[in-house]
Image: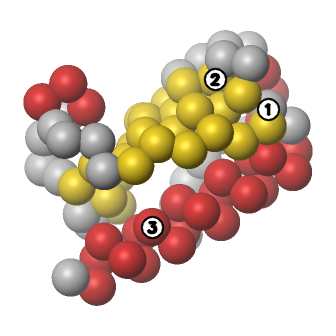
Amino acid sequence: MLDIPPLLFFQSKNPFSGSQKNLRFLIKPEENLIVYIWKGPYCFEKSEILETKEFPLESKGREAMLAWLEEKDKELNEE
């Protein structure tokens, strides 16, 4: 399970990046939560972004984002 900060962290406009095995991700809060994923081992600037997705900046959006990241984690770590 991924350890993601609470909603207030993102509502305060703080970005967050993390990783788990092959999955790397960056969450940028703007009007929505914008999530970028890539496959490790390199940083965001040096990697090919595999997918980007937006979620509402609210509790249901955070829950949906977490579920999506968990799904992507399974996909990338099965390879």
Q: Closer to the N terminus: mark 2 or mark 3?
A: 2
Name the side, left or right, on which 55 lies relative to 26. Answer: right
Q: Amino acid at mark 3?
A: Lys
Q: What number is the disc on residue 57?
A: 1
Q: Closer to the N terminus: mark 1 or mark 3?
A: 1
Mark 3 residue element: helix
Q: Quadrant of residue 34?
A: top right
Mark 1 residue element: loop
**Residue under the point 45% across and 67% down:** 72
Mark 2 residue element: strand
Residue 43 percent across, percent down from the top left: 19, 34
Q: CA distance from mark 1 to mark 3?
A: 20 Å
Q: Is residue 54 above or below residue 8?
A: below
- Does residue 9 appear anywhere in the picture? no
Q: What number is the disc on residue 29?
A: 2
Labels 2 and 3 touching (C-beta < 8 A)? no
**Residue under the point 18% across and 52% down:** 40
Q: CA distance from mark 2 to mark 1?
A: 7 Å
Name the side, left or right, on which 26 lies relative to 65. Answer: left
